[in-house]
Amino acid sequence: MQVIIDERVNTEIKKYFLELGYEIIKIKKHDNIYSEISSHTDIFCLKLGNTVIYEKDAVSDMLYNKYDYFHGDNVENIYPKTAAYNVCVIDNFVIHNFKITDKKILEKLNEMKYTFIDVKQGYSRCSILPLDNRCCITSDKGIYNKLIQNDFDVLYVDSSELDIKLFNEDGTYSNMSGFIGGCSCVLNDTVIFFGDVDKLKCKEKLINYINSRGYKIKDFKKMDVIDYGSCIFLD
């Protein structure tokens, strides 16, 4: 088993994944991409069922051979080129601004007959913590409205209720804010936060919603909540 994640991920989080039996596969830092997202998983990589599509220079380690792998185009340091892989998958639905989606991803989405939900936000995966059964959490009002229109069960959390960190080049915190989708991931029945949920102003709303949808929470106490671009599990 493997987990693909930002090479800058905290040692305690790495230890947690290793104890679960996962090999750490690092997204290496891209010097040509601005530092806050320069090794984020959801900027360079997308999993669709048993298919993984990634930027060819993003992963140098050997990947688990159970999956089919394809290379998409290179990520470029200007929006929307930075968001071409940032597609959110919930059940059989895919959420993105499909005007900017990588062409290899679009090809695979059409082959696999996903249902498309087009939104204005290019960083849709960053902006959504996807659960299952058409449930999710988002901090983007436009995405929230679009998903409600499509009969999703959505918790909206305003960005003012979050305090999610991003890294500068030198490892200090950026003035930019991180995203709810990037600071978390889901493994089976557990939502994992990359930091201490108690540091988020909206913690009670998050905990109540997640628990009421049948999920447990794993977080890392006394740690700031960091956006690493989520992660991808290869089981």
Image (cartoon, rainbow, N blue to C red):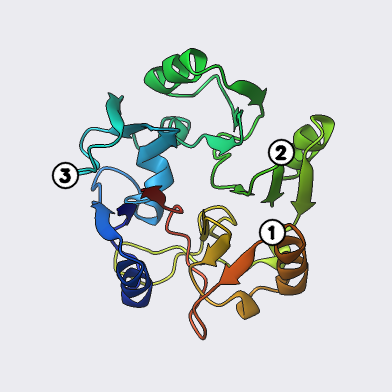
Residue 62 is marked as: 3
- Mark 1 or mark 2: which comes first in sequence? 2
Residue 159 is marked as: 1
Residue under the point 32% across and 44% down: 33
User: Is 36 above or below relative to 192?
Assistant: above
Q: Amino acid at mark 2?
A: Ile
Q: Amino acid at mark 1?
A: Ser
Label 3–label 2 contact, CB within 8 A? no
| Location of residue 167 in the rendering, given as x and y in whole percent from the top left corner | 39, 64
- Mark 3 or mark 1: which comes first in sequence? 3
Residue under the point 56% across and 36% down: 89
Q: Residue furthest bottom?
A: 222
- The image quarter containing residue 217 is bottom right
- Is 128 left, or right, of 209 in this rendering? left
**Can residue 86 be spotted in the picture?**
yes
Look at the numbered disc 1 and give the secondary structure of its residue: helix
* Distance between mark 3 and mark 2 Cα atoms: 35 Å
Q: Amino acid at mark 3?
A: Met
- Mark 3 or mark 2: which comes first in sequence? 3
What residue is disc 2 on? 143
Residue under the point 57% across and 55% down: 179
Closer-to-camera residue (169/163): 163
Look at the numbered disc 2 and give the secondary structure of its residue: helix
From the image, state whether disc 3 or disc 2 is nearer to you: 3
| Location of residue 129 in the rendering, given as x and y in whole percent from the top left corner | 61, 51
